[in-house]
């Protein structure tokens, strides 16, 4: 839910209007703006103080309270980022030096094999929905990137997609499958440059939730027994490229990862390293 100016005023937190303005000026996504404002509102309500007198210990106590209430490492990090943005970047306070981000558990991505991807895509009968999932797998797109994709972002001649304002507000170029080029040329024949490739009702952007539901239903229909999500298609894209010999630094660019370490997680789920290993059980 996007927080409006009126809602902020109604809670007598007019100071947070400055936070909202700063987030907009820095081109943060509506989702991030909403999250950061909500987090700061909840913190001040919990604390019962004015932002002007908030100190280091207040932040620590709040994060500790969230931890006791079962908040995950990821949730704690988002809360810390939101509070840090407001007090450090907007209010120019300097008390975050000894507050460290909680460590996230090291979980490996869920990857579908080639056969599972094929079965899953074929389980989707709606052409638009199948095309959306195919773009996620074939080009390594995030679900939020697929629904924002416009016709003008596709380059059929060069077989590339220009992802604009992806995660972290960074642009990047990724590959476009020749197989999808043929399908897209027909699918988009009556669309204009500014139209969404995967549109919802009245040619508006399809919601990410709708696409997630499509994936979940397809997964159920094709009886793949993995705990996969839409993002598993992006994981599978990266893993299969790596298994086919693509340089990991190039995969990093295609995915839009800032750090190579983020991309290196896929080296732990590739099959190539395991193919020639023999289990001790088979030696008995």
Image (spheres, rainbow, N blue to C red):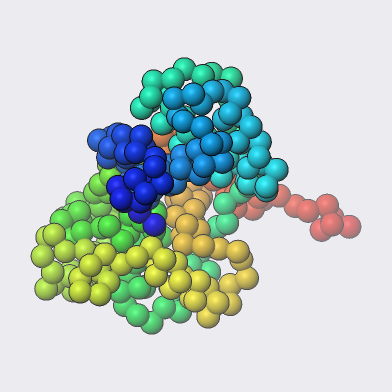
Seen in the picture, residue 231 relative to 61 is either above or below; the reply is: below
Q: Residue at x 46, y 50 (%)?
A: 238
Where residue 9 sits: x, y (%)? 34, 45
Q: From the viewer's perspective, is 95 left or right of 258?
A: right
Q: Residue at x 45, y 29 (%)?
A: 51
Q: Is residue 167 visible?
A: no
Seen in the picture, residue 184 relative to 43 is either above or below; the reply is: below
Q: From the viewer's perspective, is 208 left or right of 96?
A: left
Q: Nearer the viewer, residue 64 or 167?
A: 64
Q: Quadrant of residue 256?
A: top left
Q: Is residue 241 visible?
A: yes
Where residue 19 sits: x, y (%)? 34, 35
Q: From the viewer's perspective, is 260 left or right of 265?
A: left
Q: Residue at x 41, y 78 (%)?
A: 124
Screen quadrant of the C terminus: bottom right
Screen quadrant of the N terminus: bottom left
Q: Residue at x 37, y 49 (%)?
A: 10
Q: Nearer the viewer, residue 10 or 4?
A: 10
Q: Nearer the viewer, residue 10 or 145?
A: 10
Where residue 104 sits: x, y (%)? 62, 40
């Amino acid at each position: 839910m996007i927080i409006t100016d009126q809602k902020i005023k109604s809670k007598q937190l007019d100071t947070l209007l400055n936070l909202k303005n700063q987030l907009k000026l820095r081109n943060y996504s509506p989702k991030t703006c909403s999250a950061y404002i909500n987090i700061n509102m909840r913190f001040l309500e919990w604390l019962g103080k004015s932002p002007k007198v908030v100190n280091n210990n207040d932040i620590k106590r709040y994060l500790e309270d969230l931890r006791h209430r079962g908040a995950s490492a990821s949730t704690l990090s988002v809360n810390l980022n939101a509070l840090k943005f407001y007090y450090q970047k907007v209010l120019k306070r300097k008390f975050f030096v000894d507050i460290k981000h909680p460590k996230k558990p090291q979980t490996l991505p869920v990857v579908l094999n080639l056969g599972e991807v094929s079965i899953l895509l074929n389980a989707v009968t709606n052409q638009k929905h199948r095309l959306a999932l195919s773009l996620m797998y074939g080009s390594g797109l995030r679900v939020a990137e697929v629904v924002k994709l416009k016709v003008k972002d596709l380059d059929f001649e060069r077989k590339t997609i220009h992802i604009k304002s992806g995660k972290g507000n960074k642009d990047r170029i990724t590959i476009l499958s020749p197989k999808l080029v043929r399908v897209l040329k027909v699918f988009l024949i009556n669309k204009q440059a500014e139209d969404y490739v995967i549109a919802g009702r009245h040619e508006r952007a399809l919601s990410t939730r709708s696409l997630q539901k499509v994936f979940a239903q397809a997964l159920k229909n094709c009886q793949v027994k993995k705990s996969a999500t839409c993002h598993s298609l992006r994981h599978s894209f990266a893993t299969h490229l790596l298994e086919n010999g693509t340089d990991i630094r190039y995969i990093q660019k295609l995915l839009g990862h800032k750090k190579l370490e983020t991309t290196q997680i896929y080296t732990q789920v590739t099959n190539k390293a395991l193919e020639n290993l023999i289990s001790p059980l088979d030696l008995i």
